[in-house]
Image (cartoon, rainbow, N blue to C red):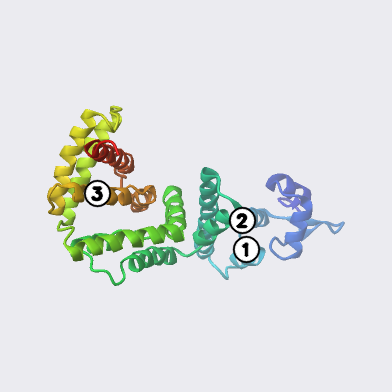
Amino acid sequence: MHEGLRTIGEMARLSGLPVATIRYYSDEGLVPPAARSPGGYRLYDDDALTRLELVRTLRDLGVDLATAARVLDGAQSLAQVADRQAAALEARIQELRVRQAVLRHAAARGADPAAVTRAHRLAVLAAGRRHLMVTELIGEATRGLDMEPGFAAHLRSMVPDPPEDPEPARLEAWVELAYLVGDPGFRTAVRAAFERHAADRASGADRGDPASWRRAERAVLDLAGAALAEGVPPGCARARAVVEELVAVFAGAHGRNDDAEFRRWLAERVRVGADARVSRYVELLAVIDGRAAGPDPVPAARWFLSALEASAAAVAGPA
C-alpha cells in the first residue's frame, strides 16, 4: 500500500540531513509527508525528497526558511530569490573586503590602535564620500590661490573615480588614500606647497608651465636617478656635473637665470617636492585608476637636493 514511499530515516540517509531537521521542515509545512504508516509514522514520496533537497540548497545559500517556503509554494520565483540573495552576498563580500583592507593597512604599517580606528572609520564610508574627501582636499589646498591654469586643471584630474566593484588591491589603495587625505599634517603640507606656487607665480619667480615642469622632473628621474643607481656620492665632481646640467634644465623650465638666488629657490622647491607622502598619493591614484604607477621620483629628487646643496657649499667655501 505504501510502495515507493520512504520513511523519515530513509529521507535522512538520502539527503544527509538529520531526522530532527526533516521533522521540523515537515512540521513547518515545507516538506509534508505523502502518507502515514499504520503505526502513524510519516512517509514521503519523490516530490517530498525533491522539495527537501531544494530547501537544503536554499538554506546552504543563506536563504531564510520563510523565503524558501514561498519558493516551494510558487509565491516567489527561484530566479527572484537567487537575484536578491546574490546582491546581498555581494554587499557582504564588499563589507568583508573593506575589513580585509583595513587589517592589511594596519598590519603593513604597524599602526597604533587610534590609527586603526581612524582607517576603519574612513574605509566604511561610501565610495562617493571617499571621492568627496579627495575633492575637498584639492579644493581646500587651492582655495583663493592664483594657480597656473594648466596646473589647476591637472590637480582637478588627480581625483580618482571610485570603482563600482573594486578588487582588493584597489580597495586597499582607497583605504590608504582616505587615511592619507585625512591626515592634518599632509593637508597642511599640500596647502603650503600650493601657496608657494601661487606666490612664485604672483612675484614672477616662476614663469614656467606644466609641460616645462614635467620635462624638468623627467630630467631629475633620468640624470639624478641614474647617478643614484650607480652610487655616485652627492658631493663628488661627477655629481657637480649632474647638478650643472639639471640646474640649466630647471632654469629654462622656470624662465630664470642660473644664479645663487635661483639655486637657493630651486633647493627649497625640490625639498618641498621630495615629500614621500605626495609621491605615495600619486602612486595610490594609479592603483585606484587601474594604471601602472610611474617610477618613484622621491629618491632621485633627494639625491639631487643633496648634490645641489653640496655644490653650493663647495662654491661658498669654508665658513
- The dot on residue 192 is none
Residue 204, image x and y in percent?
Answer: 16, 62
**Which residue shows up at 53% across the image and 52% down it?**
102
Secondary structure state at the residue bearing disc 1: helix
Residue 250, image x and y in percent?
Answer: 17, 47
Outermost residue on the right side: it is 39
Question: Taking 104 as reference, is 73 above or below it?
Answer: below
Mark 1 or mark 3, earlier in chain: 1
* Label 3 close to label 2 by CB (< 8 Å): no
Quadrant occupied by the C terminus: top left
Q: Is residue 289 left or right of residue 28?
A: left
Question: Taking 175 as reference, is 237 above or below it?
Answer: above
Q: Mark 1 = which residue?
A: 68
Name the amino acid, label 1. Ala
Residue 88, image x and y in percent?
Answer: 53, 61
Quadrant occupied by the N terminus: bottom right
Q: Is residue 140 left or right of residue 242?
A: right
Name the amino acid, label 2. Leu
Q: Between 189 and 124, which is closer to the camera in this rendering?
A: 189
Q: Mark 3 = which residue?
A: 264
Select label 1 or label 3 by which is in front. Answer: 3
Q: Between 30 and 181, which is closer to the camera in this rendering?
A: 181
Name the amino acid, label 3. Arg
Mark 1 → mark 3, Cα distance in angstroms = 75 Å
Mark 3 → mark 2, Cα distance in angstroms = 77 Å
Secondary structure state at the residue bearing disc 2: helix
Mark 1, Cα crowd under 10 Å, few <14 / some 14-19 / many 20+, is: many
Q: Between 183 and 38, which is closer to the camera in this rendering?
A: 183
* Label 1 close to label 2 by CB (< 8 Å): yes
**Which residue shows up at 72% across the image and 49% down it?**
17
Q: Between 127 and 248, which is closer to the camera in this rendering?
A: 248
Q: Mark 2 = which residue?
A: 54
